[in-house]
């Protein structure tokens, strides 16, 4: 990745140099554009929406509260939906940038007797997001709506229990694949030795490849904790055991900092684009589905108009027909009477 990055940098420098000599009157355009982007960033801010899914007790809620340096107080603000899903939005001020964080916490599937019902509640939630985006796109106030509301879900962190990937996880991941951007998370990394952790990561990746599940990044093995020792950031420093501390923010122990980096520093634009791609697929399907429906509607309207016109002119047509029939009959009778009278006269 770093090699590609360096090449990319070299390429862009070459382009800048070439364009600078070709368009001297536009020199400094790069800084100008960057300044405009920065001003927009400071004004509008950025946003991320993160959903967590997986078995119960794997530390989903704990990780959500550890993910952003300033501990979010989402737990107190969220009202769970009927299915226990908690959806909260909070704005953090990070280096002068308003950063909206939407966290969607779902209960572990192990707590539900009917797994299918639980799976459906998750997929329905994701579908509903698409419906909302589609509705908002059609709304006349689309621009202001887009700049204000956090649209859709940027990433779904799928929690896998340490040491073992269950078939039920594969089934759910397959259902979610393509509906949302997925990053697998290996929970409770402090319960695995570094070697076990590496082997398990590889095993999970093999299974994901085998099942053609689309993911954004290879698994992160994280440690999270409720303990917060740093009073300025409220950042949790790890899990303390009698034999030592498993430090959640230390990259030698835990991928939590790497996950955070992937979500915010390196991957946010990528996550946004993935979300748009998924939405566009949904939109395409909606529009394709609309075409036959529209044709049927047009046919129904045309038939209704034809029936209406017939119903409207029918009484007049009927009256005209009766009149014509009566005239015909009268004429026939007159002719018959004439013929009769003439025959009588002649005899
Ligand atoms: N060993 C270890 N325990 C953890 C870790 N993260 C969280 N826990 C503990 O696991 C327990 C469950 O954590 P939660 O965050 O409530 O788990 P959850 O996945 O949200 O559970 P449900 O909401 O019931 O699905 C708590 O006691 C946490 O302290 C971790 O990285 N390692
Ligand atoms: Mg929870």
Image (tube, rainbow, N blue to C red):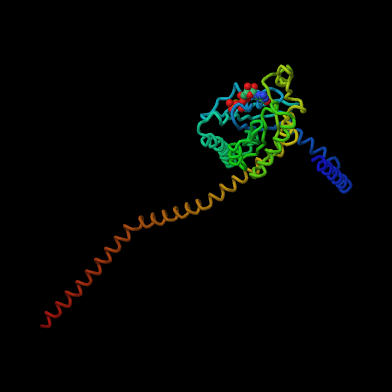
- Of the 4 image quadrants, the one containing the C terminus is bottom left
**Observer-nearest residue: 132 or 175?**
175
Left or right of 302? Residue 164 is right
Q: Nearer the viewer, residue 41 or 331?
A: 41
Location of residue 112 in the rendering, given as x and y in whole percent from the top left corner: 52, 30
Where residue 278 appears, x then y in whole percent?
A: 63, 43
Give the quadrant of the N terminus.
top right
Residue 156 placement (x, y as % from top left): 64, 35
Residue visible at 27% across and 64% down in the picture = 323
Q: Which quadrant of the frame does ligand 1 lie within?
A: top right
Instruction: Identify the residue at horizontal 62%, vertical 39% (top origin).
Output: 180
Q: Quadrant of residue 4?
A: top right
Could you tell me if residue 56 is visible in this image? Answer: yes
Q: How many marks?
A: 0
Please say if 94 is above or below 134: above
Residue at x 55%, y 36% (from the top left corner): 119
Q: Quadrant of residue 50?
A: top right
């Amino acid at each position: 990745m770093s090699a590609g990055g360096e090449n990319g940098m070299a390429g862009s420098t070459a382009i800048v140099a070439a364009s600078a000599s070709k368009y001297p009157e536009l020199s400094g355009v790069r800084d100008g554009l960057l300044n405009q982007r920065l001003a927009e960033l400071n004004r509008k801010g950025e946003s991320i929406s993160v959903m967590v899914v997986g078995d119960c007790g794997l530390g989903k809620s704990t990780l959500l509260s550890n993910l952003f340096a300033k501990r979010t107080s989402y737990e107190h603000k969220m009202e769970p939906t009927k299915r226990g899903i908690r959806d909260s939005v909070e704005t953090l001020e990070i280096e002068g940038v308003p950063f909206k964080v939407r966290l969607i916490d779902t209960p572990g599937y192990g707590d539900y007797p009917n797994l299918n019902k639980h799976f459906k509640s998750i997929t329905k939630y994701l579908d509903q997001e698409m419906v909302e985006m589609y509705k908002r796109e059609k709304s006349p106030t689309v621009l202001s709506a887009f700049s204000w509301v956090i649209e859709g879900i940027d990433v779904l962190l799928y929690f896998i229990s340490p040491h073992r990937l269950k078939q039920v996880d594969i089934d759910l991941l397959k259902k979610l694949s393509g509906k949302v951007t997925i990053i697998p998370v290996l929970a409770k990394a402090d319960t695995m030795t570094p070697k076990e952790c590496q082997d398990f990561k590889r095993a999970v990746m093999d299974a994901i490849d085998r099942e053609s599940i689309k993911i954004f990044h290879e698994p992160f093995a994280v440690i999270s904790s409720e303990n917060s020792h740093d009073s300025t950031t409220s950042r949790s420093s790890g899990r303390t055991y009698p034999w030592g501390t498993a430090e959640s923010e230390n990259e030698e122990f835990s991928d939590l900092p790497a996950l955070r980096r992937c979500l915010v520093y390196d991957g946010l634009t990528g996550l946004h684009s993935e979300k748009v791609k998924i939405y566009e697929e949904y939109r395409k399907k909606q529009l394709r589905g609309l075409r036959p429906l529209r044709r049927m509607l047009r046919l129904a309207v045309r038939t209704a108009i034809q029936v209406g016109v017939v119903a409207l002119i029918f009484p007049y047509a009927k009256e005209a027909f009766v009149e014509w029939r009566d005239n015909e009959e009268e004429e026939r009778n007159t002719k018959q009477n004439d013929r009769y009278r003439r025959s009588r006269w002649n005899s």
